[in-house]
C-alpha cells in the first residue's frame, strides 16, 4: 500500500508540474499578445500628450560593461531629450510598480555613467488594472495605460493630482 501511495503522489506531482508549465506558457503567450497590441500604438498615444518619440525598442535588455543584464524593458521610447520606459503586464500588481521603480533607478544610474542627460519617465500598461494598483502607480509618478475600446488610454499622473516622476 505504501509503494502504491508513493507512486500516486509522484504521478500527481508530475502532472501538476506539467500543468503549471502549460499555464506558464499560456500566460507568456498572452503577455506577448498584449505587448503586440500596445507597442505599435505607443508613439501615437503619447503624441496625444505632446510627447514626440522618434525611436521605439521592444524587449530591450540593458547590459553593463561586465555583460550582466541590468534591466529588461518591454518598450523603450526615446527622442533627443526624453525616454519613456513602459512595463507591460496582463494584470499588474503593486509589486510590479515597485519593480518598475527599481528598474528606473538602474536605468538612470546606467544613463549617468554614459553621460546620457535625457529625462527618464516611466509607464505601466495593463489589461486588467485594479483601482488600487492604478492609484499607486500614479502616486509613484508613472503614466498608466489601460484598454479603452479598440486601443488604450493613458492616464497622466498630473491629471489625478500627482507629479510625473523624472529619473
Image: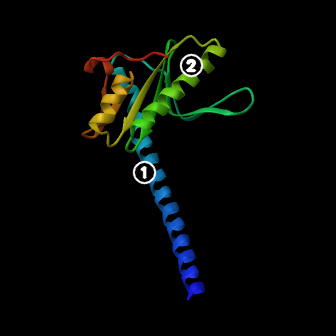
Q: Can residue 45 be seen in this view?
A: no
Q: Which of marks 2 and 1 is in front?
A: 2
| Residue positioned 27% across, 40% down in the render | 150
| Marks 2 and 1, the one that precedes in the sequence | 1
Mark 2, secondary structure of its residue: helix
Residue 133, given in percent of the width and then of the height, sits at 33, 35
Residues 19 and 58: in front is 19
Circle 1 residue: 30
Image quarter of the N terminus: bottom right
How many badges with numbers are in the image?
2
158 left or right, relative to 113: left
- Identify the residue position indicated by label 2 in the image: 108
Q: Residue 81 appears at what percent x and percent y?
A: 50, 12
The x, y position of residue 45, in whole percent, is 34, 27
- The 10 Å Cα crowd at callout 2, few under 14, some 14 to 19, many 20 or more, is many
Name the residue rendered at 38%, 33% in the picture: 41
Local crowd size for mark 1, using a 10 Å CA cut-off: few (<14), some (14–19), many (≥20): some
Residue farthest along the right direction in this orientation: 66
Residue at left 31%, top 18%?
162
**Residue 158: which quarter of the image?**
top left
Q: Which of 25 and 16 is in front in this view?
A: 16
Kindly report the distance in space between the C-alpha atoms of the residues bearing marks 2 and 1: 30 Å
User: Which residue in the rendered view is the most extreme toward the front?
Assistant: 2
Residue 99 appears in the rendering:
yes
Residue 75 spot, x, y in % from top left? 49, 32
Question: Quick check: 165 above or below 96?
Answer: above
Q: Is residue 7 shown left or right of residue 44?
A: right
- SS class, disc 1: helix
Left or right: 85 in relation to 48 = right
Quadrant of the image occupied by residue 34: top left
Amino acid at each position: 500500500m505504501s509503494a502504491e501511495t508513493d507512486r500516486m503522489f509522484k504521478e500527481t506531482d508530475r502532472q501538476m508540474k506539467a500543468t503549471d508549465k502549460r499555464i506558464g506558457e499560456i500566460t507568456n503567450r498572452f503577455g506577448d499578445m498584449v505587448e503586440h497590441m500596445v507597442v505599435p500604438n505607443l508613439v501615437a498615444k503619447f503624441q496625444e500628450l505632446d510627447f514626440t518619440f522618434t525611436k521605439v525598442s521592444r524587449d530591450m535588455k540593458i547590459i553593463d560593461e561586465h555583460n550582466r543584464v541590468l534591466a529588461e524593458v518591454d518598450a523603450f521610447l526615446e527622442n533627443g531629450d526624453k525616454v519613456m520606459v513602459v512595463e507591460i503586464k496582463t494584470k499588474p500588481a503593486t509589486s510590479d510598480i515597485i519593480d518598475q521603480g527599481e528598474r528606473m533607478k538602474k536605468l538612470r544610474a546606467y544613463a549617468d555613467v554614459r553621460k546620457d542627460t535625457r529625462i527618464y519617465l516611466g509607464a505601466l500598461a495593463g489589461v486588467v488594472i485594479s483601482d488600487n494598483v492604478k492609484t499607486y502607480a500614479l502616486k509613484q509618478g508613472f503614466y498608466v495605460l489601460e484598454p479603452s475600446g479598440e486601443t488604450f488610454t493613458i492616464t497622466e499622473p498630473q491629471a489625478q493630482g500627482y507629479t510625473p516622476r523624472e529619473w
